[in-house]
Amino acid sequence: MGMNLYGLFIALGVLAAVLYMGREAVRRSLPRDLALDMALWAVPLAVVGSRLYYVAFTWERYRGDLLSILRVWEGGLAIYGGILGGALGVYLLARRRRLPFLTLADLVAPALLLGQAIGRWGNFFNQEAYGLLVDSPVFQRFPFAVQVNGQWHLATFLYESLWNLLGFAVLLRLRAASERRGPGTLFLCYLLWYGLGRLVIEGLRLDSLMLGSLRVSQLLSALLITLAGLALLLRLRRAWFHGLPLLLGLGLLLLSALGQGWALVPGYVSLAVFVAGLYPSLAREEAA
């Protein structure tokens, strides 16, 4: 039953994303059938990408039974791999229909957050994406925690779902601003928003994909925050010192990764300050 519900919520997430893209395509005066085409191109490649990404970092689990790689309904899909695969699908479609890739990326960005917010609930039924043990009886209840194998764990899937839902609302608010700033701006906002949330939440999980002693998703999140943050600073024409919280936050997180535990929370706070500082600039552009 859990596995069936896992697939159901993934499918519901895809459906919600396609419905949103259909309405948004009409608003942007793009072809009406574009949303369905994007789903047909991007979703299969996203599934393949997310599975291959997961298998690559858990190879010992699959090397003795290669056919088990095909059983995606059992779980084991990594979102960052899905983003890479889906981006390839969108790029191929853009080439085929002779449309700007960044325009399609802006169309997809809010839809991704909406679909991820819904799809994360599949992890609840499949007992994946859970966090650290919860010892306090006060918090041993939903929505703070979920019970896995008789023990209470942080409900990190829920935290990410809510973060993505909030991000969907934020990106809707910034649509007009992104159009003034040029194609790709809204997608950069997606990368920055999702990267920040995933960076923090991943640190609470127990089932992270690892590269040595480092969490792969945290490494990728830090990279996305850096690239998207710098690109947005350039587009917003902000002075160089506005990027100091970004550099400070990344530096503190590096210290944390090197064993300086005290630097973790200040690093997160610095990155949050950087992201919060960009929002008023975008909002003012929208109201101008």
Image (tube, grey):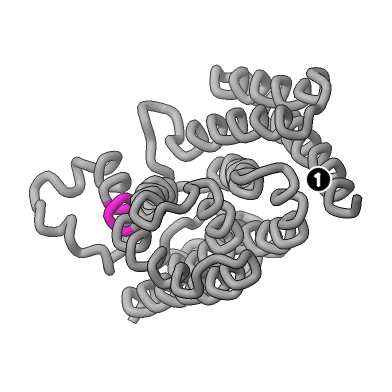
Instruction: Report whether 112 appears left or right of 3.
Output: right
Percent position of residue 74, x then y: 27, 66
Identify residue for label 1.
282
The reply to whether the magenta stretch includes residue 141 is no
Instruction: Report whether 221 appears left or right of 87.
Output: right
Instruction: Report whether 143 appears left or right of 240.
Output: left
Where is residue 200, by image quadrant? top right
Percent position of residue 178, x then y: 71, 49
Report the residue at 80% width, 36% height from top: 273
Q: Decide which of 237, 192 is in the foreground and name it.
A: 237
Percent position of residue 51, x then y: 28, 53
- 94 over 21 or under it: above or below: above
Magenta region: 47-51
Three-letter amino acid code at the position of disc 1: Leu
Q: Residues within 10 Å of mark 1 (few under 14, many from 20)?
A: many
Report the residue at 51% width, 55% height from top: 104
Q: How many marks?
A: 1
Q: Find numbered disc 1 in the image and state the secondary structure of the residue it sits on.
A: helix
- 143 over 218 or under it: above or below: below
Where is residue 250, by image quadrant? top right
Report the residue at 46% width, 53% height from top: 99
Screen quadrant of the N terminus: bottom left
Res. 169 in view: yes
Q: Main secondary structure of the magenta part?
A: helix
- 215 over 28 or under it: above or below: above
